[in-house]
Image: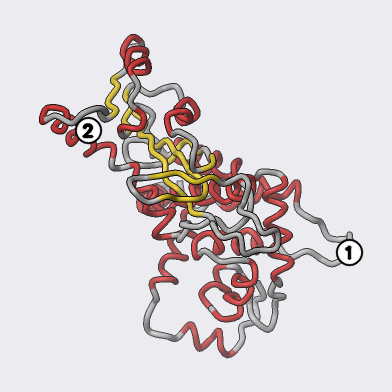
Amino acid sequence: MSEQRTLASVAYDSKRKTTRREQFLQEMDAVTPWAALEALVRPHYAVAGNGRRPLPLATMLRIYFLQQWFDLADPAAEDMLYDSESMRRFARIELGEDRVPDETTILTFRHLLERHQLTAQMFAAVNTLLSERRLLLKAGTLVDATIIAAPSSTKNATKTRDPEMKQTRKGNPWYFGMKLPIGTDRRGVIHSVVTTHAAAAAITQLPYLLHGQETTLHGDKAYDKAEDKLQWELSGGRYLVNKSGPRTTYKDAINRTRSKTRARVEHAFHVIKRVFGFTKVRYRGLVKNTVRAYAACALANLFRMRVDLRAYQLQHQGT
């Protein structure tokens, strides 16, 4: 970002109110481990001397995160950089002095992350940070899955639905898309992520949602299985999955008690789908959407733990 400020930028500094968007971006800027995340991408990023000079890696990574937080397609991300001063400042771009990346440059960077599956490594790096700060609990795991909708229409160039997406019934309505199963700790911080088509049974993904150090397991009725319960209890763990089968007063009471803890996994879905807007897939196929899912989960963990992370930074400032 250039040191020279435009008149518009100087006037922006003198405004009286800090908007909610600015506050959000300031908070996320403070708690995101930029150095660690940039180090993951740098070995794969273009270097100067081969054609057009690349934009700073920090700028492109920040723009990619803006896309996740505000559910922006590549053209919309370019437009927002021209429209929003707060987004330009977050991306370290000074309008009139720095080059604003066009949608093709943004797309190329996104493809770089997809090609090398770097968002999965970013998710792991964020969880390593949380573990080091003792903000990721290991004692228990909560499991659940949510459906991310995909276009069901065949009014497109190929005249077909996405072949990697499936439909499933949940209650009476039918849903078409992908399923996002996750495993979280007892506070709803995500430690495991899987993606499947929507018709895949949730229980089939359970082994991929455990980290192996759990002493308790919480889940809804879809994860209830007698063999798993027996194996879990033989190993000394507590199997606290909601009971399935015909409803009784006793069973309903047990499920209500267990759901008070199990429901915390929904806090992660709230951030991903309501705060970040990841309710519909943007791309065809599972691979590209899985890359986005890992990025969304990593950023959701930072968002949910931002107060604790900031408190840790302030406590250890200067040490």
Amino acid type of the residue that numbered disc 1 sits on in the rendered structure: Gly
In-front residue for pair 74/56: 74
Q: Mark 2 points at which residue?
A: 258
Q: Position of residue 276 (x, y in %)?
A: 45, 59
Q: In this view, does 116 lie to the left or right of 206?
A: right
Q: Which mark is residue 93?
A: none
Compared with residue 195, is residue 281 higher up or lower down, i.e. above or below? below
Hey, which quadrant is residue 100 in on the image?
A: bottom right
Residue at image location 37% in from the left, 18% down from the top: 228
Task: Indicate the secondary structure of the residue bearing disc 1.
Answer: loop
Residue at image location 35% in from the left, 21% down from the top: 225
Q: Name the residue under label 1.
A: 51
Q: Position of residue 260 (x, y in %)?
A: 21, 39
Q: Where is residue 186 in the image (x, y as percent from the top left)?
A: 32, 36
Compared with residue 220, is residue 292 higher up or lower down, i.e. above or below? below
Residue at image location 60% in from the left, 72% down from the top: 76
Hey, which quadrant is residue 54 in on the image?
A: bottom right
Hey, which quadrant is residue 226 in on the image?
A: top left
Task: Indicate the secondary structure of the residue bearing disc 2.
Answer: helix
Answer few, some or many: residues within 10 Å of disc 2's Cα (few below 14, many 20 plus, some between 14 and 19).
some
Compared with residue 141, is residue 239 higher up or lower down, i.e. above or below? above
State which tag comes first along the sequence, 1 or 2: 1
Answer few, some or many: residues within 10 Å of disc 1's Cα (few below 14, many 20 plus, some between 14 and 19).
few
Q: In this view, does 44 lie to the left or right of 174?
A: right
In-front residue for pair 122/103: 103
Separation (CA) of disc 1 from disc 2: 59 Å
Residue at image location 17% in from the left, 34% down from the top: 257
Q: Residue placed farthest to the right in the image? A: 50
Amino acid type of the residue that numbered disc 2 sits on in the rendered structure: Arg
Q: Nearer the viewer, mark 1 or mark 2?
A: 2
